[in-house]
Image (tube, rainbow, N blue to C red):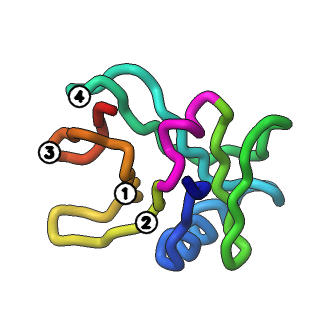
Amino acid sequence: MSSVGLTAAAAERIKAVVAAEPAGAGLRVAVEGGGCSGFQYEIAVDKAAKADDLIIERDGAKLFVDPVSLPFLLGSEVDWVDELIGAAFKVKNPNAKTSCGCGVSFSV
């Protein structure tokens, strides 16, 4: 199974979000227990990668994934979607068997 992907739209949005942060900042995507389906995504700006992070780079944007979250995210793609109901980063995860209506939590 491949690593974690990042769409061009997500890369552009990450660059805009971290523009005011120190050099080396990026978006962190993590998987934590909880949410209505068992696991949930935590997405936040991080000032720097940690030593054991997987770093995905595209068009100058950086995405950080910790080693505990990585097995849950293998083959996933992080996208930026701008819809009538709102704009947000979305994780398209082929490992998720079910997910909640908002797409924030999932089960494997």
Looking at the rendering, the stretch of residues picked out in magenta corresponds to 68-75
Looking at the picture, does residue 101 appear above or below residue 76?
above
Residue 25 occupies quadrant: bottom right
Mark 1 or mark 3, which has the lower sequence index? 1
Which residue shows up at 64% across the image and 43% down it? 65
Asked whether disc 1 touches disc 3, contact meaning CB atoms under 8 Å apart, the reply is no
- Inter-mark Cα distance, 1 to 3: 14 Å
- Inter-mark Cα distance, 2 to 4: 21 Å
Mark 2 or mark 4, which has the lower sequence index? 4
Give the residue pinned by disc 4: 37
Which residue shows up at 69% across the image and 59% down it? 56
Give the residue pinned by disc 3: 101
Bin the neighbour count of mark 2 within 10 Å (Cα to Cα): few under 14, some 14-19, many 20 and up: some
Which residue shows up at 41% across the image and 58% down it? 89
Give the residue pinned by disc 2: 79
Give the residue pinned by disc 1: 92
User: In x, y percent, where is residue 42?
Assistant: 46, 37
Mark 4 or mark 1, which has the lower sequence index? 4
Tell me the kind of residue under disc 3.
Gly
* 34 on left or right of 44: left
Tell me the kind of residue under disc 4.
Ser
